[in-house]
Image (tube, coloured by chain):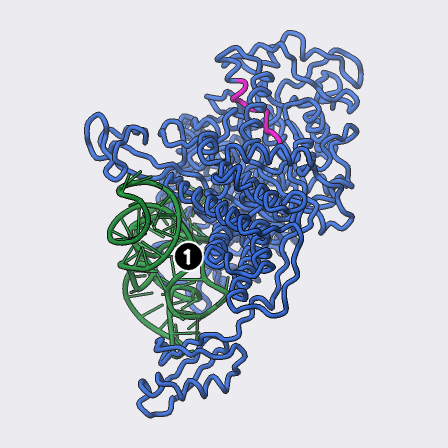
Chain colours: A blue, B green
Amino acid sequence: MASQESRYSPAELEPRRQQRWAELGLDRTPEPSDQRSDNFYALSMFPYPSGNLHMGHVRNYVITDVIARAQRLKGKRVLHPMGWDAFGLPAENAAIERGVDPAAWTEQNIAQMRQQLSRLGLSIDWEREVTTCRSDYYRWTQWLFLQFLDAGLAYRKEATVNWDPVDQTVLANEQVDADGRSWRSGALVEKRKLRQWFLKITAVADELLDDLESLKGWPERVRTMQANWIGRSTGATLRFPLAAKASEAVEVFTTRPDTVYGVSYVVLAPEHALVDQLTTDEQRPAVEQFRQELEAISDQDRVAEDRPKRGVATGGTVVHPFSGESVPVWIADYVLPDYGTGAVMGVPAHDSRDYAFASHYGLPITTVVVKPGSTAADGPADEAFTELGELIHSGPFDGLRDEAAKQAVIDAAAAAGVGEAKVSYRLRDWLISRQRYWGCPIPVIHCDDCGAVPVPEEQLPVELPADAELGASGGSPLERHPTWSQVACPRCGKPARRETDTMDTFMCSSWYYLRYTDAANNEQPFSVEATKAWLPVDQYVGGVEHAILHLLYSRFFTKVLNQRGLVECREPFARLLTQGMVQGITYRNPTTRRYVAPAAVTDPQQPLDPESGEALEVFFEKMSKSKYNGVDPGTVVDRYGADTARMFILFKAPPEKDLEWDDADVEGQYRFLQRIWRLCAAAQESGLSIAEPLPLPSQLESSDQELRRAVHTAIEAISDDLEGEELQFNTAVSELMKLSNAMGSSLAEAAAPVAQEAVRTLLILLAPFAPHLADDLWEQLGGAGSIHQQQWPHLDPNALVRDTITVVLQVKGKVRGNLEVPADTDKAELEQLALASDVAKKWLEGNAPRRVIVVPGKLVNLVP
RNA sequence: GCCCGUGUAAUCCAAUUGGCAGAGAUAGGCGACUUAAAAUCGCUCCAGUGCGGGUUCGAAUCCCGCCACGGGCACCA
């Protein structure tokens, strides 16, 4: 080899290796074992096929690929698939802007991205490729929707929903950020009252929250985010009968039933159904005016916390369920119509919002909870006391404390028929209707007589019409289509209409990981056996931006499918790695705030604006076209090869942290691979072959022992980095560097069996990271088969053993020297040696130490 | 405001989870090789771990109080 090809040339080597892998069929998924633990499912979040592979994708898939390859070497049967989240607005927008066919546009992008991906040397089983916009996939998305419908978990209702004015469609709550902007378009969403399809995710809110505990392999951060999003609060509902009509009551939700005697008013959301009935003629103009004012301001402003709380008395009153006193009813902007019951009891003394409201409107403030042992007079009430405590002025409940007090009130309310324990959630049902064309049609037919009728299973898929007229405005294209929606009712046969909304694309991505396990199945979306063999996904890798969205929806799907006996697991993803962003070096003119392309900067040490000559700001930011800071994966592969790109991305930062792309570091990584190439070339030249494993002699030179120690240290460290609690590819790569450094200085002198073991091991350890180079060198050195068919090296604990070790000698915790001792020296001996040492003589000045701490194998600390 | 994460050398990052702060890399400096340069090889400069306290024989690591940056939630009763 070395004779014909003495230089490392990834451009020639990599395609050659990939072709060989294809011939050997290495990437094909093996039949799963009956033993679930012998199977391993490695999964990256599948991409939207934009047509352009970017570095974020590369990082994602390389991480998963390293895991998949390492698991294969460890003898696991690995499922490592890929697919396309292919429905969505970019295709439809391209169609509108350029008149192309969304399906053709998408397929072309997929072909392009598949091509770009293929260069990275990912061990993906493309036979299981899944594309959500093809009818062989979306017929099953529709089938699953019908499962939800059958379970009573899909329903249509009129509701105030988020409307994205740019994308011209509604959005789910999860798809609107804290600033009230659409996750896709960034537009401020508007409120519209529309009749829409929802999935009842709130039905499994408890499981979604409680099972987070079991997800030990998930980042804490993601679990907290989901817990926050679900927002469970436990409390009670209490009913306050109307003074004017005792058969009706205002129902409030509270987490503090113990404060019920502190109620000085009741507040309804302005939209509440009882407002009209409660409003007196005298107050009606004020109430109407207030409601109109509220309608004029955006929802976003309405819920801003710093806004003063405003409200209006309705003039009506209700009866306190315990004291029987009359309580005035108000409406206020701080009560939300769609949380709890849309009504709250105002307890100003013990709730800061109520306190602010009551102070503003001069409503009475009655203290009913105090710190145990104190009285109301003890503290000036200049703010609400929101802690739990002891009840006073609370009739029969006086003296009760904390949770017991809450429970007593709930029990009394239940006994009297005026309330009961109740749990509320922040989580809302998932709005899945979209008024766009390029999505999965909702398989329902509306009949005037039969209502919403599910499309019979045998009629699936409900296919999208190829001839829809797409346009940026004027409602859903399916609705405008002249004939598509006209069908016969499946139940009564009368003329009826198809549902013209399509599904949220998150529906498609909520079950794709299941389809991979059984991608060719034409009878069902997946078989129970297939999902049993592979699920839950052993390692899922993707961006943290889906911490709530995709990950919550997928968990929801899994729970429902589990309840219906379609899958056995209750959670889809056992371990989750949320990878950080890839950032590019970004130059900006500080005065004009315009971005400058790195190519235009002549001196990177002193970046100046090529036009004005001003000094530029330099920072790292997520790669994007508008900032000119993107690095194209294809260019990097052209220049350095896929292996360098892979190694760099893994080495530069821990996987969950953001990664700063730096060309100088890429160069360094390339040099490392070249070093390995030269190392192997030199070994081969000196006659080393790895074809036949040579037995190790029983006696080794100490330099050979040292080399073996380096080899087995690397095995131990890298195995742990790839399998331990934390995945640490960056340190694994640095262990490879350490090993290659050690080999560089000792391989030439090493005994043949030791040298052979070292080279074999280095290459196999390298194989998951730089699969092309490792495989090529393997072959050149005479290794049998592909390196990717080998076994992960076995750790020999004896190789790690040292005869002598260095023990640190401390005096009062400060390092003052060290001792060279046999490795098995025991505690007492170490202490003796330490006390007899020069260090002891010098620092203890003849006195006996007060204390001696001995940590065997580590140190001796003398405390005078 | 509440919750989570991060803060170590000029830079990116390690540190067996309480035991010698530096494994690995980038950049810089010096040297070897070279007619020279690149490449390569060798050597080398640079921090006491964001700040202030505490616990301990011993703290980057544990505790308390701050600061900075990033992220999530936020009138959710």
Residue shown at 42% from the left, 66% from the top: A375
Furthest-top residue in view? Answer: A482
Q: Position of residue A130 (x, y in %)?
A: 66, 29
Quadrant for the C terminus of chain A, please.
bottom left
Q: Tell me: residue B2, above or below residue A677.
A: below
A374 vs A272, left or right, is left
Q: Position of residue A474 (x, y in %)?
A: 52, 12
Q: Which residue is mark 1?
A: A385
The question of residue A159 being in magenta is answered with no
Q: In which quadrant of the rendered view does residue A45 lie?
A: top right
Q: Position of residue A630 (x, y in %)?
A: 40, 31
Q: A222 or A767, which lies in front? A: A767
**Label total for image:** 1
Residue segment shown in magenta: A83-92
Residue shown at 41% from the left, 33% from the top: A623
Q: Position of residue A149 (x, y in %)?
A: 71, 30
Quadrant for the N terminus of chain A, please.
top right
Residue shown at 48% from the left, 30% from the top: A634
Asked if one can make out residue A292 in the rendered structure from this viewpoint, the answer is yes
Residue shown at 64% from the left, 47% from the top: A783
Q: Tell me: residue A752, above or below residue B53.
A: above
Q: Chain of mark 1?
A: A
A263 vs A65, left or right, is left
A560 vs A830, left or right, is right
Q: Secondary structure at mark 1?
A: loop
Q: Amino acid at mark 1?
A: Phe
Q: Tell me: residue A367, above or below residue A228.
A: below
The question of residue A86 being in magenta is answered with yes
Q: A354 or A393, which lies in front? A: A354
Q: A502 or A648, which lies in front? A: A648
